[in-house]
Amino acid sequence: MESTSNSEDTITFKLSHFYSVLVVLAFAVGILTGYVVWGRSSVQAQTVIANQPAAQAVPAATQPPQFIRYDVPSDGFPGIGPEDAPIVIVEFSDFQCPFCKRFQDETAKQLLAAYPGKIRFVYRHLPLTSIHPEAFPSAEASMCANEQNAFWEYHDKIFENQGKLGRELYMQIASDLNLDTTAFEDCLNTGKYKDLVQQDSDFALNLGVQSTPTFFINGLALVGAQPLSAFTQLIDKELAGEIP
């Protein structure tokens, strides 16, 4: 369509130009509408997110820890301390275990001194024979010494000489402690306490004990050569009646 000139000014467009303008306008309107709609949606989304509560941290446990008391006999086994003590600690130990020696060297005496007259400490055997070949023989030797009322002195000497365990040492300790060495040697030769040591070991394994030293404080388990503070925390709660 071409433009012509009359007495009045008129403006004419080619039809193709008119369509082009419409397309441009429609595109512009579409962009504007999309922006408005998207903008509103985005703001709404941000508002929803802002109004949502922040992610909650896992709440701390409000229930007291659950304690399990195991039935671990202590009568008839080597023990030290008052028989009527309010705290009975049963240790399952291995004379060749370095962690058992660590407890003996670093904690045992301090523990008994911290609660004078309040602890009965009992020793039971758990020789880890798969890794400690002298664990079982040394346990038997200690029971032969126990027969002559010298368990704890013998116990201490074994740990002091842990790097030299063997028959020669067992006999030497018996001599140094002025034991009847003939009776002591006969006790070793006949395996008099072999079954007793094995029964201790079987009991511990059936109870679920897997390592030495493992302690039962009034039946409450404490595993490993723990520092003194680990014992005192549990004992203090027990003495205060805070553990069911």
Image (tube, helix red, strand yellow):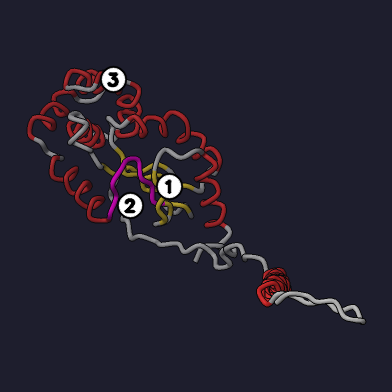
Q: Amino acid at mark 1?
A: Arg
Residue 120: mark in rendering:
1
Side of 241 where 4 appears, left or right:
right
- The numbered mark, 1 or 2, whose residue comes first in the sequence reads 2
* Vertical position of residue 137 compared to residue 238: above or below: above
Per the image, label 1 sits on a secondary structure element best described as: strand
Residue sitting farthest toward the left: 190
The image shows residue 151 at horizontal and vertical percentages of 30, 34
Looking at the image, how many numbered discs can be counted on the residues? Answer: 3
The image shows residue 158 at horizontal and vertical percentages of 30, 26
Side of 226 where 156 appears, left or right:
left
The image shows residue 145 at horizontal and vertical percentages of 24, 32
| Quadrant of the snapshot with the N terminus | bottom right
Instruction: Give the dominant element type of the magenta stretch: helix, strand or loop.
Output: loop
Cβ atoms at labels 3 and 2 below 8 Å apart: no
Question: Label 1 vs label 3: CA separation?
Answer: 29 Å
Q: Quadrant of residue 194?
A: top left
Q: Amino acid at mark 2?
A: Ser
- The numbered mark, 3 or 2, whose residue comes first in the sequence reads 2
* Front position in the image: 188 or 90: 90
Identify the magenta region.
Answer: 208-216
Label 3 crowd (10 A; few <14 / some 14-19 / many >=20)? few
Cβ atoms at labels 1 and 2 below 8 Å apart: yes
